[in-house]
Amino acid sequence: MAQLQSTSITGSLNLAAATANTGSCGNLWFNTTTNKLQYSYYGGVWSVGGAMIIGRACLAGAGTNTAALAFGGANPARSCTETYNGTSWSAGGALSTARYGLAGAGTNTAALAFNGRSPAAVTCTETYNGTSWSAGGAMITNRFCLAGAGTNTAALAFGGVFGGGRCACTETYNGTSWSAGGALSTARYSLGGAGTNTAALAFGGRSPAAVTCTETYNGTSWAAGGALSTSRYGLAGAGTNTAALAFGGTPGGTCTETYNGTSWSAGGVLNFSHVQGAGAGTNTAALAFGHFSAPNNNVTETYNVGFQVNTFTGTVTLPPYIGV
């Protein structure tokens, strides 16, 4: 959402209210402490949360913005798992196979980790019970830098790098084994994903340049959706196929877009760049974590949508007897 940052006012304006009014959007008031005009609007804002224990990129995520799981990643290939309680991260059980460029699905107590690079591309799947990881069914295609959606017993894997080239293949998991699904229309890697195994969303990615294309999956085949406003890869996603959030990536590592099932629109700007990071949550309550380089590769940010307050730039110099 575009937010006004500067304005000029001609004529006279009498603002009796000097306190914040966020009961609805569109209210304007004068802050007598800072001598600045402020206004309320409805939109999404990112705020900084607790830092990860180990900063890393090319990791996977699952869960919600107050109960998230981060696993795998590079710096170098990692097996570590961390769990987020809405405030801070703590250590969880280690993956059996250290890897990066993997994908994930599920919740923080029932997650799925699949594919990745260790250092070659692998097919292994692992499932998490809130404490430890155990082996699941092997994937058909060994690949990395793919996207995932769904749960630990009904997951979807799509896109990625296979055999040195970008991949269009899709696989679906039933809790025991993987089977082939319909291929993406645009083969790509380092893309974002959201939704379930029968109602998924694929967006952005590299093919070989950054793309804006979005595709939606109905459990059998992919169809074109509305294009992202900003072409990018190495982004993360959250939400469903009709209410999704896309954030981070390159170029434009701080931009956020929200999807309504038809088209994308601008969301709140991230405080830090998140490239090759991970995400969790919904389109109105999301979590972003990880980045490809220090010093902010351990930064966590949480996204919330509601009534917000913004301030016009510039300070108003009050004349004598204002409002009289």
Image (cartoon, helix red, strand yellow):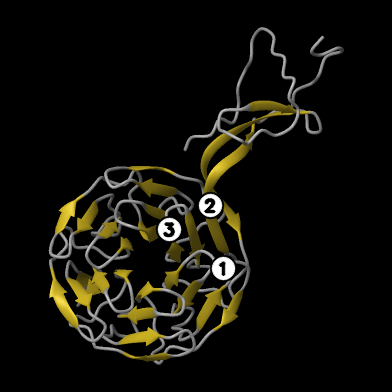
Amino acid type, label 1: Ala
Identify the secondary structure beneath mark 1.
loop
Is 176 on the left-hand or right-hand side of 77? left
Identify the secondary structure beneath mark 3.
loop
Circle 3 sits on which residue? 282
Front position in the image: 182 or 168? 182
Neighbour class for label 2 at 10 Å: few (<14), some, many (≥20)? some
Instruction: Please state which of the two labelled residues, at mark 2 or mark 1, is closer to the viewer.
Output: 2
Amino acid type, label 2: Asn
C-alpha span from label 2 to label 1: 26 Å
Residue 118 visible somewhere in the drawing: no
Residue 173 vertical placement versus 286 (above, below): below
Instruction: Please state which of the two labelled residues, at mark 3 or mark 1, is closer to the viewer.
Output: 3
Residue 216 in which image quadrant: bottom left
Q: Specify the quadrant that holds the C terminus.
A: top right
The residue that appears at 17% across and 70% down in the rendered structure is 169
Q: Earlier in the sequence, mark 2 or mark 3?
A: 3
Circle 2 sits on which residue? 304
Residue 282 in which image quadrant: bottom left
C-alpha span from label 2 to label 3: 9 Å
Q: Earlier in the sequence, mark 3 or mark 1?
A: 3
C-alpha span from label 3 to label 1: 27 Å
Circle 1 sits on which residue? 294
Neighbour class for label 3 at 10 Å: few (<14), some, many (≥20)? many
Q: Residue furthest top?
A: 11
For the image, the number of numbered tags is 3
Neighbour class for label 1 at 10 Å: few (<14), some, many (≥20)? few
Residue 298 visible somewhere in the drawing: yes
Q: Position of residue 78 (x, y in %)?
A: 46, 84
